[in-house]
Amino acid sequence: MSDAPANTFTPAPLDASKRTWLIASGCAGAVGAGFAAVPFVSSFQPSEKAKAAGAAVEVDISALKPGEKMTVEWRGKPVWILRRTPEMLASLKKTDSEVADPKSDRKAFPIPEYAKNEWRSIKEEYLVVVGICTHLGCSPVDRLQSGPQPSLPDNWEGGFFCPCHGSTFDLAGRVFKNKPAPDNLEVPPYMYLSDAKMLIGEDKKLKEIEAGHG
């Protein structure tokens, strides 16, 4: 008979997506109560098993008002959807010269062709990015309002701030110059199913590739 205790438990190893999510959540949580939590939306069509495997996620954006942001999960990562106001879009002209990679030319990870523009999106109004800092995987917080704020420059035009190491991103997810983060926030593949719905994790080019190998 074995001498091992009856209640011996061996924890299962974390997969890569869960580890990334824990790093991002833990870093944001360590900042303190001074930062407001971002609401998390759970309106996913695929099963949990399918999501873990990277299945595309259908999102209803019909209730998202100008100036508002929602967060959904794709491949274990938070994906932000920000509906930008005309004023937010106008601010991008002002930050063009201040960001390190204004047209997303860097190749750290694949960037869809439709994101290689000033607003980094298919439709100017809607920004879709992975909400994980490209430095060490922390989760930036919203600083959408313009103007002087703690830890930000007086000429702040609105965007996102990573409190872990001080990286800042504008309202297109573009990293400012001379910051720890080496790249802009990642733009995942996505496409519009209608004016009110989008599909995160799949775009027309991917569908064409899959059809060609079918």
Image (cartoon, grey):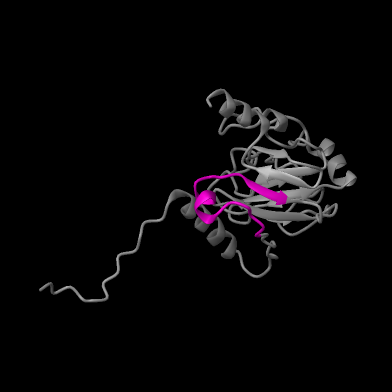
The residue positioned farthest toward the front in the image shown: 214
Q: Answer whether residue 102 is visible to the viewer in this image.
A: no
In the image, residue 54 lies at what x, y percent? Answer: 53, 45
In the image, residue 48 lies at what x, y percent? Answer: 53, 56
The residue positioned farthest toward the left in the image shown: 1
The residue positioned farthest toward the right in the image shown: 86
Provide the residue span drawn in magenta.
42-59
In the image, residue 130 lies at what x, y percent? Answer: 63, 46
Is residue 90 located in the magenta-colored stretch of the structure? Answer: no
In the image, residue 32 sits, relative to residue 211, either above or below, namely below
Q: How many marks?
A: 0
Say which of 61 and 159 sits in front. Answer: 61
Say which of 3 and 116 sits in front. Answer: 3
Q: Tell me what residue is drawn at x 36 percent, y 56 percent.
A: 13
In the image, residue 38 lies at what x, y percent? Answer: 69, 61
The quadrant holding residue 135 is: top right
Q: Tell me what residue is drawn at x 65 percent, y 60 percent.
A: 42
In the image, residue 95 sits, relative to residue 144, either above or below, namely above
Q: Answer whether residue 11 is visible to the viewer in this image.
A: yes
115 on left or right of 85: left
Say which of 4 and 181 sits in front. Answer: 4
Q: Tell me what residue is drawn at x 30 percent, y 69 percent.
A: 9
Q: Where, quadrant-wise, is the N terminus in this rendering?
A: bottom left
109 on left or right of 62: left
In the image, residue 205 sits, relative to residue 145, either above or below, namely above
Is residue 53 located in the magenta-colored stretch of the structure? Answer: yes
The residue positioned farthest toward the top in the image shown: 212
213 on left or right of 204: left
